[in-house]
Amino acid sequence: MAFLEISERDRLDMTKLHASISDLSKAVTWAQHVMKKKWYRGPWSRGQTYSHQSAYITSIVMAYGRVFASGRNGRRFPEKLIQYDDSEWALHHRLLEMRNAVYAHSSLDRFTVKPWKVDDFETTVIGEPINKIEETDLKRLIVMAERLQSAASKRYAEIVGPYRQSSRASDSKASVLDRAMEAIGQLEVGEAIAIPITTDPA
């Protein structure tokens, strides 16, 4: 069997780490795009820029927030891997609060509806959350996310390392290609094998 026999606890921990690394990578990519485009508009700006900005900001906040949500299996991102200073913790809490109150749910205290009338003229004054993250916070978010990715990758390697060592000791004489082909044959829809590419220094 090409796949390692991993305990259910370690498998869930590894899966949470992998999902977190993926979400953090998305958040970084989208934050970099917003910075490149200089999308720091308000909803009153002309054109479609604010709509595009809103989609990216929503995606950034949701991707970052997923890292710290336990989900149905109850697995949380390991707190010991989070090494933030005070300003980073402040942004972290603000992003999670935004996620919970604005992007995952529409908290009514973030909206205003004020009917207004003067003589024969009537209208409604409305207010909604502004989908914007300033450049300073985006830069800080990227640093935070990349640090978390590195810590999560290291922890992932620590978990899987002993299993790989044990597997090497009991491997059959089948070639690496044969074992890789066996693994490919067992892939499910949506799965892929990450193969590191090495070059011959000669």
Image (cartoon, rainbow, N blue to C red):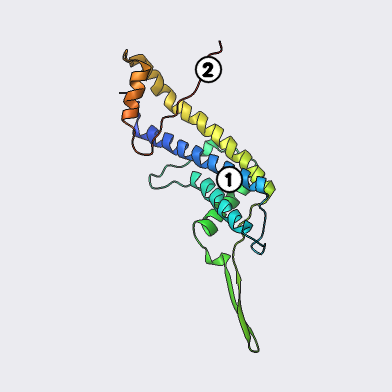
- The residue at which mark 2 appears reads as 199
Q: CA distance from mark 2 to mark 1?
A: 31 Å
Q: How packed is label 2: few (under 14 Cα within 10 Å), some, or many (20 or more)?
A: few
Q: Considering depth in this image, is 155 or 175 the residue closer to the camera? A: 175
Q: Residue at x 49, y 39 (%)?
A: 22
Q: Label 2 sits on what residue type?
A: Thr
- Residue 30: image tag: 1
Residue type at the position of mark 1: Trp
Residue 76 relative to residue 117: left or right: left
Residue 3, visible in the rendered structure: no
Please state the horizontal and vertical placement of residue 21, each as a whole percent of the image: 50, 37
Where, by quadrant of the figure, is residue 173 drawn? Answer: top left
- Placement of 3 over or under 100, stated as above or below: above
On screen, 38 above or below 18?
Answer: below
Measuring from the top left, give residue 38's x and y in whole percent. Answer: 68, 49
Whichever of labels 2 and 1 marks the residue nearer the N terminus, that label is: 1
Q: Dot 1 surroundings within 10 Å: few (below 14), some, or many (20 or more)? A: many
Please provide percent x and percent y for residue 105: 49, 59
